[in-house]
Image (cartoon, helix red, strand yellow):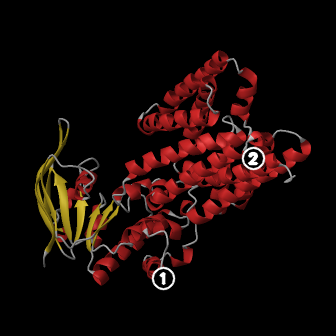
Amino acid sequence: MFAYDFMRYAFLASTFIAITCGIVGVYVVARNYSFLAHTLSEIGFAGGTFAVFLGWQPLWGMLLFTLLGSLGVGGLSLRTDQKESAISSISAFFIGLGVLFLAISGENSRYATSILFGSIIGVDKQGVIQMVVLSLIVIALIFSVLKGLNYDSFDHIGAVSHHVNTALISVVFLLTLAMAVAIGSQVVGSLLVFILLTLPASTARYLGRTIGAMLWWSVGIALVGVWAGLVISYYTNLPVTFFISMIEVVIYLTAYFVHRIKK
Amino acid sequence: MSDVLTVKNLAMQFEDKEIFSNVNFSLKKGSTTALLGANGSGKTTIIRILMGMLQPTSGQVDFNSETKIGYVPQFRNIDADYPLSIRAFVELDTPLFKNAAVKERVNHILEETNLTEIQNTRMGEASGGQKQRAYLAQALIDRPDFIILDEATASLDPMAKVELMELINHLNEKHHMTVLFTTHDIPLARKYMKDYLLFENKTLVSGQMANLSREVES
């Protein structure tokens, strides 16, 4: 399996992406941003198709749209009373935009599939380098505000009363989330990227009692999903995205039911 | 004894609505004061002003320069699924990489707040009293000498209330910590606090708890 360049590249890229999504996910879940992550992935879809329309690589369009979207939608979702309907309408708008860009770029089905469902098997050496560098930037950003991010995400009221700069932390985190969505979409596609961003971290909440333990569990579960997904996909010739989703869902449901039964 | 806090001519209004005005008081080092008043009378507002989280319309708030404040807010977002253990929650305000001194400090505070045995229990599964003690423990981490508690006993059963108040008295007696405690439970305040500040007619009156008229309770 590892005799092939494309499999080595796929493993390397998805390893970094799983680590990134596993870490970012812990804070997505703690801050109740799952819905926002989902919206950003739809904005990412529009960004990917926009890039195709302009003849760029989808990753750059996704990054552009999710970064701008995270600040706009993030501000809206943190402040507006009617945040769910506001975000839903934005999602609908961007999906519509994505469909439009695909239609006018004349590249319909091939790109639509790879943007929506991922195309990790097709990643080349340059793509791997891009994703590794972007992952490292996300991880570095998270670590630069880690103490405040921990406090704000797990005890917002306590953090505010200890004069932690929660506004700055929120902006930095939204930017990392946007980048994680854009690079995570390269593996599982924009339609399912929130799976990598929410399920391993949600499972980790049942297994860890400290932030450190949750981070390890979340990264571990994300890695198991992408590695096992790639291996099974290699031998069955069925889509990686399908296996990753199934593995993450099964792990989550198992942890959930064990937790319920114990309680 | 020296004053840890002096408040002069403090006034607060939200748009056209006056919350309070002409508020003057000072707190002595090592005093225990109940901040009393009906719901909505301005207790939380004045605390937020003291904490620098809200700008007053006018007036002055002066803390003694050596004073270090610990604050336990009224509400926390801790639901039944909250994953962190009591210890991990208390440690949120400590450095990421904890040296022996920090670990020792956390151990000591857990001991003092009677949480050592349940330190690995998830916060979401802790009782109301255990949670309140954990909130207090988190506020004690940076060694405050003045602790402000906002309605800390409001949702507790009688046993847990007594346990928390005994703990607060212990901190006051052993560490000479100044205590400001907001509540609308006057019998509780009468039992555990020495002084009072009472919101009445949109201003604050002060005195000794023992002299507080029984009429206020009704």
Residue, disc 1: B100
Under mark 2, the amino acid is Val
Q: Position of residue A60 (x, y in %)?
A: 58, 36
On what subunit does the disc labeled 1 rest?
B
Q: Quadrant of residue B138?
A: bottom left
The residue shown at (43%, 77%) is B109
* Farthest right residue in view: A236
Q: Position of residue B131 (x, y in %)?
A: 47, 64
- Report how far apart the C-alphas of labels 1 and 2 lie in the structure: 40 Å
On what subunit does the disc labeled 2 rest?
A
Residue, disc 2: A249
Q: Which secondary structure lies at badge 2?
A: helix
Q: Position of residue B35 (x, y in %)?
A: 23, 61
Q: Position of residue B29 (x, y in %)?
A: 19, 75
Q: Is residue B11 left or right of residue A60?
A: left
- The image shows residue A173, relative to residue A119, as above or below, that is below
Within-10-Å neighbours for mark 1: few <14, some 14–19, many 20+: few
Q: Is residue A199 left or right of residue B209?
A: right
Within-10-Å neighbours for mark 2: few <14, some 14–19, many 20+: some
The answer, for residue A256, to whether it is visible in the render is no
Query: The C terminus of chain A appears in which quarter of the rendering?
Result: bottom right
